[in-house]
Image (cartoon, helix red, strand yellow):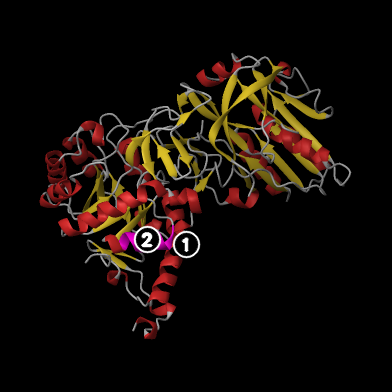
């Protein structure tokens, strides 16, 4: 008799405990969006994110691909930024005193081989990051992710295991939606000591051609697809992963409204990455999504996030 | 919300104007509504894409003034009328028009381009306009002065003294502020200049708006490349007012490189 179950807004609790990290709400700024400076992380936190992720850091500075690197289309965004980042030494200088940000900060770490991941994690170890995310799934940067063969169960195990040995922080392994055996890879990460799976990275790569120029728009020609187009695929990946692994899942892919967030949590996500939503709804997408989650919970008789997680399963 | 072009459209360059030995203006036809101070992303397929402020906004005709300073602008300068370029935008928040005020526009170098449309727009509403418009333009040398025919009565300064006052726009403005009161100063140019202009205006109690420049990638506020103290120059700016700038510690001090590293402004 749900309609009798009157929930006051003040009783609704959006807080989430993710691998021991206390979040005031399940929304997390996804890696690659706005995470270039501490000032921007702080701004995103002020706009309601429960946690934030920095833009991925490699050992050496990288300029990334030439422009155009990011374009939008009717159903989302296509990007091939190419992991531009200032390198681990400059990143360690930028991300000091992270308590100023106001919410937990997740370090995204990339490398061309497992030793690189270790070196970057160690290089950032003096900073107060709350977790390490290792994306093994970028579809558009030579030397990294899928283009470096990191999306196999063996490579995933090896890299995760190597990072596990050098940090006590929770490790989130970010996976590609492209690979049919995503659950096998997730299990490899789990076996190697990962604390959570971030599902999913951008899909594809895809391509958009300007027909008058008769050329692909992105300078790298192809790029990862995100936003609305990715959401049903991300939801399915999270649904499958929820059955296959025991560690929590951070659902990412096309979340820009409260309903999207609820859907992803019902598939099995304990927390939610938001990226392209910053474009479609503005930098305060986090606050908007949280308000919409809250309203939905009130209308539907839920007062805790954990009652929603996995609700779509039989 | 005004109409905005999300993916580049290919437009034909219909006219090219040589503004100075190093600056050319490229005209093309586009209809979306633009505000002074906004910018477009210009795409040369297979080469690169860069932001340019609009320097002419006329009925159905848009112009960008391009200073030759690197591979991309060299390529643009070699374009002929009839050639195609890709345009998306407009992006960003432009100048806040004060039609009832005495205003001063301070342009340094190619920064004059974004102020030009502001002055045009103020002239366009001249029947409603009650205040006066003063333009200060600074350039390295006489030949580099922009829009001399377009705006008759500019106060000029050059580094070498070959035109107008020998000195900087900041010197000229400082002198002017002791003689004349403005309700608003608009500025665009090198960030060091902008910093000094804003500080000077603060001392005189004059509200200021300055247009900043950063390396821009997406243009619509997601990539974080153009950060200035938590403000995204591409979407929160490029124009910021005195109050906003006073909260931006990086303004005048720190810029951000292609890799995303925050470095001391040169």
Q: In this figure, which residue is indicated by the disc labeled 1? A: A288
Give coordinates of residue A195: x percent, y percent: 19, 55
In this rendering, position of residue B195 left or right of residue A118: right
- Which residue does the image show at 25% across and 36% down from the upper left? A145
Q: A79 and B98: which one is in front?
A: A79
Give coordinates of residue A277: x percent, y percent: 44, 51
Q: A65 and A232: which one is in front?
A: A232
User: Within the image, what quadrant is residue B34 found in?
Assistant: top right
- Which residue does the image show at 25% across and 51% down from the upper left? A237
Q: Residues within 10 Å of mark 2 (few under 14, many from 20)?
A: many
Circle 1: element type? helix
Q: B5 and B71: which one is in front?
A: B5
Residue extent of the magenta highlight? A257-265
- Reply above or below: A294 against A30: below
Q: In this figure, which residue is indicated by the disc labeled 2? A: A261
In this rendering, position of residue B243 left or right of residue A228: right
Q: Chain of mark 2?
A: A
Residue A264 is inside the magenta segment: yes
- Which residue does the image show at 37% across and 78% down from the upper left? A301
Q: A32 and A185: which one is in front?
A: A185
- Reply above or below: A186 against B254: below
Residue A221 is inside the magenta segment: no
Res B130 label: none
The prevailing secondary structure element of the residues shown in magenta is helix
Q: Compare marks 1 and 2 and give the one earlier in the sequence.
A: 2
* Residue B81 seen: yes
Q: CA distance from mark 1 to mark 2?
A: 11 Å
């Amino acid at each position: 008799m749900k309609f009798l179950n009157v929930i006051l807004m003040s009783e609704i609790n959006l807080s989430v405990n993710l691998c021991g990290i206390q979040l005031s709400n399940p929304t997390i700024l996804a890696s690659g969006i706005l995470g270039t400076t501490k000032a921007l992380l702080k701004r995103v936190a002020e706009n309601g994110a429960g946690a934030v992720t920095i833009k991925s850091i490699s050992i050496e500075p990288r300029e990334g691909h030439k422009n155009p690197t990011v374009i939008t289309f009717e159903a989302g965004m296509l990007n091939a930024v190419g992991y531009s980042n200032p390198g681990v030494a400059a990143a360690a200088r930028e991300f000091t005193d992270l308590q100023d940000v106001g919410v937990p900060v997740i370090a995204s770490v990339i490398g061309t081989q497992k030793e690189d991941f270790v070196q970057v994690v160690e290089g950032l170890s003096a900073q107060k990051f709350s977790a390490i995310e290792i994306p093994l799934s970028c579809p558009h940067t030579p030397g990294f992710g899928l283009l470096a063969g990191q999306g196999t169960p063996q490579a995933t195990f090896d890299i995760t295991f190597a990072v596990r040995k050098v940090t006590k922080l929770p490790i989130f392994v970010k996976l590609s939606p492209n690979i049919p055996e995503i659950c096998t890879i997730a299990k490899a990460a789990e076996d190697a000591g990962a604390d959570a799976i971030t599902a999913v990275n951008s899909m594809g790569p895809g391509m958009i051609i300007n027909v008058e120029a008769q050329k692909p728009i992105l300078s790298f020609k192809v790029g990862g697809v995100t936003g609305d187009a990715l959401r049903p695929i991300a939801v399915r990946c999270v649904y499958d992963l929820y059955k296959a692994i025991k560690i929590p899942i951070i659902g990412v892919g096309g979340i820009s409204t409260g309903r999207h967030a609820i859907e992803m949590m019902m598939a099995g996500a304990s927390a939610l990455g938001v990226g392209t939503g910053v474009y479609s709804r503005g930098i305060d997408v986090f606050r908007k999504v949280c308000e919409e989650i809250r309203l939905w919970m009130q209308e539907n008789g839920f007062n805790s996030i954990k009652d929603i997680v996995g609700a779509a399963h039989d | 919300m005004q109409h905005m072009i999300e993916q580049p459209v290919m437009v034909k360059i219909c006219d090219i104007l040589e503004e100075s030995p190093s600056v050319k203006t490229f005209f093309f036809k586009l209809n979306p509504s633009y505000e002074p101070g906004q910018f477009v992303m210009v795409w040369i397929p297979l080469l690169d894409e860069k932001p340019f402020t609009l320097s002419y906004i006329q009925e159905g005709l848009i112009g960008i003034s391009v200073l030759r300073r690197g591979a991309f602008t060299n390529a643009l300068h070699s374009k002929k009328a009839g050639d195609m370029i890709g345009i998306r935008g407009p992006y960003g928040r432009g100048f806040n028009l004060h039609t009832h005020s005495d205003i001063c526009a301070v342009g340094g170098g190619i920064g004059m381009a974004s102020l030009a449309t502001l002055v045009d727009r103020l002239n366009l509403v001249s029947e409603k306009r009650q205040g006066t418009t003063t333009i200060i333009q600074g350039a390295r040398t006489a030949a580099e002065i922009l829009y001399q025919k377009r705006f008759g009565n500019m106060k000029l300064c050059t580094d070498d003294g070959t035109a107008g006052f020998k000195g900087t726009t900041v010197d000229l403005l400082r002198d002017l502020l002791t003689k004349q009161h403005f309700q608003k100063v608009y500025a665009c140019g090198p960030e060091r200049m902008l910093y000094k202009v804003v500080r000077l205006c603060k001392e005189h109690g004059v509200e200021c708006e300055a247009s900043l420049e950063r390396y821009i990638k997406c243009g619509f506020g997601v990539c974080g490349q153009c950060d200035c103290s938590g403000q995204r120059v591409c979407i929160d700016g490029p124009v910021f007012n005195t109050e906003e700038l006073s909260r931006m510690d990086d303004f005048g001090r720190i810029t951000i490189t292609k890799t995303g590293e925050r470095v001391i402004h040169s």
